[in-house]
Image (cartoon, rainbow, N blue to C red):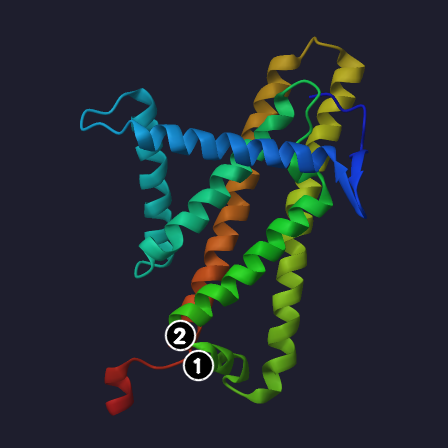
Amino acid sequence: MNGSELFPSVLFRVGPLQITGTVITTWAIVAAIGSAAWLLSRRLRLQPGALQTLAEGVVIAVEDAIRAVAPDHVKLLLPFIASLWIFLVVANLCGLIPGVHSPTRDLSATAALAILVFLSVHWFGIRSQGLKRYLRHYLTPSPILLPFHLISEITRTVALAVRLFGNIMSLEMAALLILLVAGFLAPIPILMLHIVEALVQAYIFGMLALIYVAGGLQSQQLRQPPQGERHE
């Protein structure tokens, strides 16, 4: 949990692109998660070992969370939501490694995740309902509300990015300040605080993403009365 740098430094450049520590850490996390998933999927057994049991438990937990919000779209949303949740947990916790900063303490990383959620909401909505039917919900119940719908889309995306960035950044800064003042007299409470807060923030971001995507999938249905009521 080395906090000598408040902001990621540029390690090298590829043309106009600046490659920072956040980018390298993110690539490493993606590669590690992908490798772990590949290795686990190659050794599946009817009598699972400890790692397979853990992996199956994670998948079941994510399935249950999706089923509680969007019961008709569990299989559709599972790859995206599970990948997002797993990445956030690992990204938030990797700040515990000496000399490594959590990618989510960088606003550019959290903004990229929020934009990904924003695009996924519309992707899943259009895929489920069709372009015309999906866009129609922005004019429901009145076209006058269109600007408010658009403002809502923008503000919730910004809030999603800033909330995660602010919480992880403040967590690492608070831990750094306490360690500077108290030295290593209280490492265990700081470690536990970091773990708990990292897991909580990953859960909140993932759950909000799930709610937003489920809202996009069900936007038209939520604005229409049930079939039986329309015939009454």
Left or right relative to 29: residue 19: right
Task: Say if 197 sits above or below 226 in the image.
Answer: above
Residue at 46 percent of width and 54 percent of height:
210
Residue at far top of view: 185
Residue at far left of view: 46
Dots 1, 2 in contact, CB < 8 A: yes
Residue at far bottom of view: 232
Residue at 71 percent of width and 24 percent of height:
175
User: Can residue 171 be spotted in the picture?
Assistant: yes
Residue to which mark 2 is pinned: 129
- CA–CA distance between discs 1 and 2? 6 Å
Q: Callout 2 environment at 10 Å: few (<14), some (14 to 19), or many (20+)? A: some
Residue 194 position within the rendered picture, expressed as x and y whole percent measured from the top left: 61, 27
Residue to which mark 1 is pinned: 133
Three-letter code, disc 2:
Gln
**Helix, strand or loop status at disc 2:** helix
Residue 2 position within the rendered picture, expressed as x and y whole percent measured from the top left: 73, 21
Task: Say if 23 sits above or below 188 in the image.
Answer: below
